[in-house]
Structure formats: structure tokens, C-alpha cells
């Protein structure tokens, strides 16, 4: 009898060991998405090991995937029949949906995907904010968010402005620079941006830096704007939409013909440390203030802000998008005590093609691998060519045909699904390698269910072999050309 028990235990052990070595492989190419295959982990590497995970690595614990709520996205959604709208919202936000978004971002005042320019208080000199209101948002953004909350009532939210009310700016206009086709700003006011400074920089964005803060640096204006943030948060809270994070400005270094606001390091420090942070702490202590959104690779500019001794008490974290992602690794190394988040996916130029999918797949590898615990996508849904109110064609995860009243899930949608369906809140990002040299980005994670996940892209014209060491076993596989891949094992 004892011998039978021993044999049974050995057999059971072998069964579980074999099961643990099985891998589900989901592969997407332009011709076929999420094609499933099964394979096994192996005892030896095939060729040189591409990446190793030995159990102790832990870059960051992931918190949330999210997307932005914009007016033109709301318009796109409403072009579809009601049943299709609900199907899309479920896929985006439901815990059992495709993308499982648990976070939303929206703009305080107009952004470049608003129908037109507006703010919550355009009464010049209204320092008491008597005329502040969110009436416009109650017809667009709030209904959009409410529809998403049906599928996930626990959605969290964060905000940033693109532009303050125009009367709070030195040029008294929503945009930073004039553009004869898309705005009515006086071209003579463009002088305010650089004055007579012609100094330019190579290999950085922007090539010239603003010499003036476009927000009026007067204490009365600065305090009113801090109060404005708090009134906005309170107004949305009354609508059942809680904001838990704020960033003071979207892209301080985009000198835009659409709503924007240029800031200098001195102005950023002054407003955040002396006005916004203390006002939030007094009025909304539940709301965290992050430094962002950083869209410049001028390391010295961001370092100047973060090196101010007041910043650890001002900012809880730092948010990056576009060129800002290039300096993320260096800043995280110097300032390890901040939380780091990605704040906006790169929207491209309205191609809606496989190249956009590869680009987004690679961006996720970069930001998660470099310690970002949250990732926000830009427009989840747009119609036709995805054109902004100021002429910029941009990509989205879902594309609506305004004439046919149909929706297409773009290649980028499936690139996102490769990650979001498995990397859930609480997942640990274990290790990664970029695809800069070989076009083979790889990232390894472990989700709360105990599944080991390998995400690998092959952006080459031919198949490429990779070998990933997972403990004592190896994932050996030949990746098809121009493919996105997820491997799941326990």
C-alpha cells in the first residue's frame, strides 16, 4: 500500500510539472490577430538567451490601464447604433472585457479633441470664480464617463488642463501661437514666446525654449487658478466622478496652435509648490499632485524642477509622454522615490495601420519596463480620419465610419489587448529588453493569478528566434515577421 501511494504521488507530481511547462501562445500579424497555439518550455536555450528572469526581479507593481474621454470621441460613439455603443463600452471598460480599462483621463477646459475652445469660466477678472460652471461638460464628457461607469463603477480618474481660461494668460488666448487656418490669435503676440532669444538646441524637443510663462505670474491669478482646480474637482465629485490625481498642465513644451500653455521651470515651481499643492492639500487632501505631463527630452529643464528642495513635498509622482519618455530612465535613476506613470499614448498621423500597432506595442514595453505603474491611451474611439479640431489626423483604437455607422477595431486595438487582457492591477513587471538594436522588444510580467507572461514583438522582415529564461526553463520560439506575441504559463 505504501509503495502504491509513493507511485501515485510521483505520477501526480509529474502531471503538475508537465502542466506547469505548458504555454499558451497568442500571435498577431496583419493578416491574423490573436491566433492561439500551445507549446512547452524547454530545458535548454536555443541559441543565445534573449532575456532572463530568475524569480527575484521586480521593476514595478502595475496599477492601471486607462484612456482619455474627449468630446470628439463622444461624437464618434454616438454615430453608432445603441447596441454597438454598449458592446464597445463593455469591451473597453468591463472587468471581463477586452481591454479592462480601470482609469480615465479628461481635460479641464478644452483640449485639441474638444469640439471648439471653451473653459469653465471665461468672465475676465472673475477672481472669486462666481461664474465658474461645468455646464458644457454635462452635455459631453460627463455623459461619456457615465456610460463607462456602467461597466466599471470603480473607475478612477485624473485630470490636466491644456489651457487655462484665456483671461489668465499673457496673450489672452487659448493657443500659444497663431495659425491663420486654425485660430484667430494676433500673430504679433507670437513674439512673447521667445522674445529676441534665438538660441536653438540640437536633437531635443522643442528646439527653442519659451522665455515667458504664458500663465500670468501674479499672486492673485495664481491663487485663483489653484482654486479653479479645486472647484473643478468638487463639481465632478458632485456628479459621481471622483478625481484622485492632478497634473498642472498638459505638455508645457508644446507651443501649440490649439489650446496650450507654455511654462518656464521657475513658473512651474512657483505655481505648484506655492499655490496648487497647498490648496489641494487644504481642499482635497485625497487628490495626489503629479508633475506632468512631461513631453520634452530637455533633461536639464525637468531636473531643474525636480531638484528644487520643495518638490518632494509637492509632487507624489511624475508623468511622461512623447519625447519625455526618452529621459524617463535617467530621471527615475536620479529620483527613485517618486511614482512614475505614462500619461498619453502617441497618436501618429491617422494611418490606422499595422505600423501604428507595432509602435504602440513597443511603447508599452518601454514605459512598463522603465517603471511606469500606470498607462493611459489617448483616444479610444474616433470617426473617419480621426481629425482634431485643428487639422491633425490621429489614430485611435476604434475607428467609426460616419456614413456607414459602423466601427472597426484597428490593429492598435489588438496590440493593446495583447497586454491588457493579462497584465491586471497588481501584476509585477519582472524584466524587459528594448528592441532598439534588433527590433525584438521583450517584457516579462507575473499577474496576481500567478501566471508568467512574456510579451515579445518582432518588427523585422523575417522570422526571428528568441530564447527567454524563466527560472530553470526556457521559452524557445521563432517569432513570425512583423508579429506581436503573448506567452502565458503557470
Image: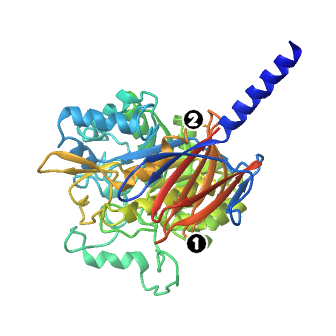
Instruction: Answer with left or right where residue 233 lies relative to residue 40.
Output: left
Asked whether, in this view, residue 487 is left or right of residue 348, the answer is right
* 398 relative position to 288: left or right: left
Task: State the residue at coordinates (56%, 34%).
Answer: 286
- The disc placed on residue 285 is 2
**Mark 1 packing: few (<14 Cα in 10 Å), some, or many (20+)?**
few
Work out which residue is located at the far top of the displayed protein and give it: 1
**Mark 2 Cα-neighbour bin, 10 Å: few <14, some 14–19, many ≥20:** few
Q: Earlier in the sequence, mark 1 or mark 2?
A: 2
The image shows residue 220 at horizontal and vertical percentages of: 45, 52
Residue at 43 percent across and 48 percent down: it is 35
Q: Nearer the viewer, mark 1 or mark 2?
A: 1
* Disc 1, SS: loop
Would residue 159 be seen by someone viewing this image from the given angle?
no
Q: Nearer the viewer, residue 268 or 480?
A: 480
Quarter of the image with the N terminus is top right
Q: Position of residue 458 (x, y in %)?
A: 51, 64
The residue that appears at 36% across and 57% down in the rendered structure is 163
Q: Residue furthest left?
A: 403
Position of residue 417 relative to residue 481, above or below, is: above
Q: Which residue is mark 1?
A: 438
Regarding residue 147, the answer to whether it shows in the image is yes
Amino acid at each position: 500500500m505504501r509503495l502504491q501511494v509513493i507511485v501515485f504521488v510521483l505520477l501526480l507530481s509529474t502531471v503538475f510539472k508537465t502542466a506547469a511547462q505548458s504555454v499558451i501562445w497568442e500571435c498577431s500579424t496583419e493578416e491574423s490577430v490573436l491566433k492561439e497555439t500551445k507549446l512547452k518550455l524547454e530545458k535548454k536555450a536555443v541559441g543565445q538567451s534573449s532575456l532572463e528572469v530568475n524569480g527575484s526581479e521586480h521593476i514595478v507593481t502595475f496599477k492601471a490601464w486607462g484612456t482619455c474621454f474627449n468630446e470628439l470621441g463622444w461624437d464618434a460613439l454616438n454615430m453608432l447604433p445603441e447596441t454597438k455603443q454598449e458592446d464597445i463600452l463593455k469591451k473597453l471598460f468591463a472587468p471581463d472585457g477586452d481591454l479592462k480599462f480601470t482609469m480615465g483621463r479628461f481635460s479641464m477646459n478644452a483640449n485639441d479633441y474638444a469640439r471648439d475652445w471653451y473653459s469653465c469660466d471665461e468672465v475676465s477678472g472673475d477672481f472669486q470664480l462666481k461664474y465658474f460652471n461645468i455646464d458644457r461638460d454635462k452635455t459631453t464628457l460627463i455623459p461619456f464617463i457615465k456610460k463607462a461607469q456602467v461597466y466599471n463603477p470603480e473607475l478612477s480618474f485624473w485630470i490636466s488642463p491644456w489651457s487655462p481660461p484665456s483671461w489668465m494668460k499673457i496673450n489672452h488666448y487659448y493657443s500659444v501661437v497663431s495659425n491663420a487656418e486654425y485660430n484667430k490669435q494676433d500673430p504679433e503676440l507670437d513674439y512673447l514666446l521667445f522674445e529676441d532669444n534665438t538660441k536653438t538646441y540640437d536633437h531635443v524637443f522643442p528646439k527653442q525654449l519659451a522665455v515667458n510663462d504664458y500663465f500670468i505670474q501674479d499672486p492673485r491669478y495664481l491663487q485663483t487658478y489653484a482654486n479653479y482646480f479645486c472647484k473643478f474637482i468638487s463639481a465632478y465629485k458632485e456628479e459621481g466622478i471622483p478625481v484622485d490625481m492632478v497634473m498642472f498642465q498638459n505638455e508645457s513644451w508644446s507651443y501649440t496652435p490649439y489650446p496650450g500653455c507654455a511654462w518656464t521651470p521657475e513658473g512651474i515651481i512657483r505655481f505648484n509648490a506655492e499655490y496648487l499643492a497647498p490648496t489641494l492639500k487644504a481642499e482635497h487632501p485625497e487628490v495626489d499632485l503629479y508633475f506632468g505631463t512631461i513631453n520634452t527630452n530637455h533633461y536639464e529643464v525637468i531636473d531643474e524642477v525636480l531638484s528644487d528642495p520643495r518638490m518632494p513635498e509637492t509632487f507624489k509622482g511624475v508623468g511622461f509622454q512623447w519625447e519625455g519618455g526618452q529621459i524617463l530612465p535617467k530621471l527615475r535613476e536620479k529620483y527613485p522615490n517618486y511614482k512614475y506613470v505614462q500619461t498619453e499614448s502617441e497618436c501618429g498621423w491617422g494611418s490606422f495601420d499595422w505600423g501604428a500597432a507595432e509602435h504602440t506595442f513597443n511603447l508599452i514595453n518601454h514605459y512598463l519596463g522603465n517603471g511606469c505603474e500606470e498607462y493611459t491611451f489617448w483616444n479610444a474611439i474616433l470617426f473617419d480620419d480621426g481629425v482634431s479640431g485643428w487639422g491633425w489626423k490621429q489614430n485611435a483604437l476604434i475607428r467609426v465610419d460616419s456614413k456607414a455607422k459602423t466601427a472597426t477595431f484597428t490593429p492598435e486595438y489588438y496590440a493593446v489587448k495583447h497586454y491588457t487582457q493579462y497584465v491586471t492591477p497588481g501584476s509585477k513587471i519582472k524584466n524587459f529588453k528594448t528592441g532598439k538594436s534588433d527590433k525584438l522588444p521583450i517584457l516579462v510580467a507575473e499577474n496576481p493569478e500567478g501566471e508568467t507572461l512574456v510579451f515579445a514583438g518582432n518588427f523585422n522582415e523575417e522570422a526571428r528566434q528568441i530564447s527567454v529564461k524563466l527560472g530553470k526553463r526556457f521559452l524557445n520560439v521563432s517569432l513570425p515577421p512583423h508579429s506581436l506575441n503573448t506567452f502565458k504559463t503557470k
